[in-house]
């Protein structure tokens, strides 16, 4: 995405000036995983740890990106219908978890969504409504049952030529967990890991005090938060119609695609926020529940342990799962808490 890269470079150059005269480094922001990633280690932020954390993110991108042709994911995609490919441990871990969500959502969440994602190009300068023939051929290639993991040999085989994996709905969550593990190995107890809005709030803000995480209005760009959640040591991940979209004749086309229609999923929702200890699960569930809609999505959350959710719909109604009662503060009174 050229435009966002330009603005991110501006951001980064400000940061370089700012950090060069401060020690320890309060936070660092870089463009990785196709988005703006910020890690804040507060007064434990040394150059060495920030370098290690961002090197790790770059390494994950070099394994998992569907936007480059030199990654493990690209090799698996290129060999679709031809031969199995040795998978990196990270690819296998994420894919296994992704497939559990394909099962739980009846195939709405599908990591083989790649051909559809490529045919829309949402988030790039070439985003456009695909021609029906293109859409149909892409849809025919999306089916998670045709992803074959050989556990013994550690390979992945996509059964049909043209199939493509896309882990955009889950890999940032894995990356946040991975960075949290790395920081813990350095005995860091407090950090905010923000990978393009996929947040991991490690530890407590201060002894006995929670972090307050703001959820912004899904309909305004980078607007004021409409509610805040008070949490500690957990991940908070949002999926919505506002992150990536383009407009044609006043209609917005967002990036969460319905494998049954080939189009962006249409329901009553503006966004779903998941609160969970595992950021990978929070990421997968934010997309999964968005695809399922409020009723089925909430049912999935209520039967999943240690996971909570906030559903915000187009009527400006906010619904929360039972575990979040008393932890939410509405900051914009045009939104109504329903529970
Ligand atoms: P989420 O709701 O978490 O996920 C939405 C994304 O999931 C869609 O964009 C699509 O990729 C996928 N998806 C859509 N429908 C479905 C479905 N039915 N089932 C499963 N998945 C679905 N973006 C760039 O522009 N340039 C890059 O170079 C780039 N590199 C990346 C490298 C990596 C390793 C990763 C993980 C992502 C990269 N991205 C890149 C993608 C970018 O960061 C996405 O915006 C992001 O992954 C989507 O996350 P989200 O939290 O906004 O939305
Ligand atoms: Mg997600």
Image: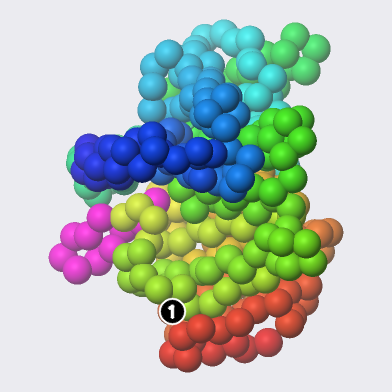
In terms of depth relative to the viewer, which is nearer, 130 or 290? 290
* Left or right of residue 207, residue 158 in this image: left
Q: Is residue 12 visible?
A: no
Question: Does 179 sit above or below residue 61?
Answer: below
Quadrant in the rendering for residue 138: top left
Q: Can you name the residue that lies furthest to the left here?
A: 249
Q: Is residue 123 left or right of residue 273?
A: left
- Magenta: main secondary structure equals strand
Relative image position of residue 263 (x, y in whole percent): 38, 54
Q: Residue at x 45, y 40 (%)?
A: 22
Q: What residue is shown with label 1?
A: 314
Is the C-beta of the residue carrying label 1 under 8 Å from the nearest atom of ligand 1? Answer: no
Q: Is residue 224 visible?
A: yes
Query: Which of the pair 198/244 is nearer the observer?
Result: 198
Q: Residue 163's spot in the image, x, y percent?
A: 48, 26
Image coordinates for residue 274, horizontal then vertical, percent: 64, 61
> Is residue 122 or residue 13 the one in the foreground?
13
Count of numbered tags: 1
Q: Is residue 210 above or below residue 12?
A: below
Residue under the image location 35 percent in, 36 percent down: 16
Q: Quadrant of the N terminus?
A: top left
Residue 70, percent from left and from top: 43, 13
Element on which disc 1 rests: loop
- Residue found 38% across the figure and 34% down from its top: 20
Describe the colour scheme in one phrase: rainbow
Classify residue 125 by image quadrant: top left
Q: Is residue 92 one of those drawn in magenta?
A: no
Instruction: Sort mark 1 into few (<14), some (14-19) or many (20+) by Cα contacts within 10 Å.
Output: few
The segment highlighted magenta reads 246-255
Q: Residue at x 36, y 70 (%)?
A: 223
């Amino acid at each position: 995405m050229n435009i966002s890269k330009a603005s991110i470079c501006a951001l980064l150059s400000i940061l370089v000036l700012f950090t060069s005269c401060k020690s320890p480094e309060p936070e660092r922001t870089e463009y990785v995983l196709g988005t703006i990633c910020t890690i804040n280690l507060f007064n434990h932020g040394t150059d060495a740890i920030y370098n290690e954390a961002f090197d790790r993110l770059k390494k994950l991108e070099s394994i998992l990106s569907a936007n480059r042709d030199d990654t493990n994911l690209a090799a698996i995609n290129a060999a679709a219908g031809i031969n199995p490919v040795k998978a990196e441990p990270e690819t296998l871990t994420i894919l296994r978890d992704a497939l559990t969500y394909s099962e739980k959502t009846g195939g709405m969440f599908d990591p083989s969504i790649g051909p559809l994602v490529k045919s829309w190009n949402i988030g790039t300068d070439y985003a456009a409504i695909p021609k029906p023939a293109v859409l149909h051929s892409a849809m025919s290639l999306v089916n998670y049952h045709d992803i074959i993991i050989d556990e013994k040999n550690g390979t992945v085989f996509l059964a049909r030529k043209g199939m493509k994996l896309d882990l955009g709905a889950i890999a940032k969550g894995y990356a946040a967990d991975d960075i949290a593990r790395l920081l813990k190995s350095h005995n860091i107890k407090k950090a905010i890991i923000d990978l393009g809005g996929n947040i991991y709030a490690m530890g407590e803000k201060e002894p006995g005090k929670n972090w307050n995480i703001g959820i912004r209005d899904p309909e305004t760009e980078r607007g004021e938060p409409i509610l805040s959640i008070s949490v500690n040591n957990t991940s908070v991940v949002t999926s919505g119609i506002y992150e990536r979209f383009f407009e044609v004749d006043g209609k917005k086309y967002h990036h969460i695609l319905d494998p049954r229609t080939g189009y962006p999923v249409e329901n009553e929702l503006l966004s779903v926020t998941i609160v969970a200890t595992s950021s990978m699960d929070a990421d997968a569930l934010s997309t999964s529940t968005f695809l399922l809609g409020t009723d089925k999505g909430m049912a999935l959350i209520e039967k999943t342990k240690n996971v909570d959710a906030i559903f915000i719909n187009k009527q400006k109604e906010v619904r929360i799962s039972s575990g979040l009662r008393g932890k939410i503060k509405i900051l914009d009174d045009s939104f109504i808490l329903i529970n």
